[in-house]
Image: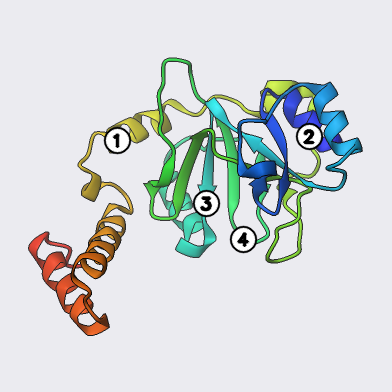
Amino acid sequence: MDSAINFARLGLRVIPAVGRAGIAGTYERATTNEAQIVEWWEGPYKGYNVAVVPGDSILVIDQDARHNGPKHWNELIQGHEAPNGLTVFTPTGGVHLYTGIGEDTVIRGRDSLLALGVDGWTGNLILLVPPSIHPLTGTPYFFRDGEPDWSLGRVLIPPAPIWLIEKIIAIERLPASARPGGRHQDLLFFALRARADNGLDTHELYEALKLYADYWGYDD
């Protein structure tokens, strides 16, 4: 409950979560209302995980360890001012970095927003925060630098550096297949369509993917 209240005071809507899904599987009940938060965590949702909804003013940079996200992020920030917002380590080896974005900046969160495995999340996505327990590993999310000084308020989530916003805007202007991770998504969608529409077996699907990749110049 204390964690939920602290995040709500930063302006993030919070909601009790079962595993990684908000109660009723939705973000719509998420709130910053402290009375509601106390009612939830002292009542029917005592001991539940805490999830937050970033909204449109916060960009969460998610370095997904499954796709070498931390490595690709470190390569991306070389020679640049690195964001220094609130940072959470996930139980699966990933990192969630919270940064602010201006009211006039519109970013649509998605997988591999900045690089393969470097996702960016805004809007109504639900993210677990400390001290929530990961449903698969049974271990907690935790802060990189220990418990924050919550009295600092939104100073804990400073604006994203200008270079980072400009890079995201430049990436968003690219064709979908040319964006980071775009080739992987394009090939996945092609494979799903080919299997669903034509009933290809594994060997036929592999040969079709090779032809498709060759046609579009996906030679790596």
Q: Classify 10 Å Cα crowding around label 4: few (below 14), some (14-19), many (20 and above).
A: some
Report the Cα–Cα distance between label 3 and label 2. Answer: 23 Å
Residue for point 91% across, 36% down: 42
Q: Classify 10 Å Cα crowding around label 1: few (below 14), some (14-19), many (20 and above).
A: some
- Label 1: element kind: helix
Q: Are marks 1 and 3 in contact (CB under 8 Å)?
A: no
Residue for point 73% across, 23% down: 32
Q: Nearer the viewer, residue 8 or 78?
A: 8
Q: Tell me the quarter of the image containing the N terminus.
A: top right
Report x, y in % for residue 116: 39, 55
Residue for point 70% across, 26% down: 31
Q: Which residue is mark 3?
A: 63
Kind of residue at disc 4 = Gly
Which circle marks residue 93 in the picture?
4
**On the image, which quarter does residue 98 sit in?**
top right
Q: Which residue is mark 2?
A: 4
Disc 3 or 2, which lies upstream in sequence? 2
Report x, y in % for residue 102: 48, 18
User: Can you name the residue that lies furthest to the bottom here?
Assistant: 203
Report x, y in % for residue 187: 25, 62
Disc 1 or 2, which lies upstream in sequence? 2
Q: Is residue 165 above or below residue 195?
A: above
Q: Nearer the viewer, residue 61 or 24?
A: 24
Which circle marks residue 131 in the picture?
none
On the picture, is 107 further left or further right than 36? left
Q: Which residue is mark 1?
A: 172
Report the Cα–Cα distance between label 1 and label 3. Answer: 19 Å
Kind of residue at disc 1 = Glu
Kind of residue at disc 3 = Gln
Report x, y in % for residue 105: 41, 21
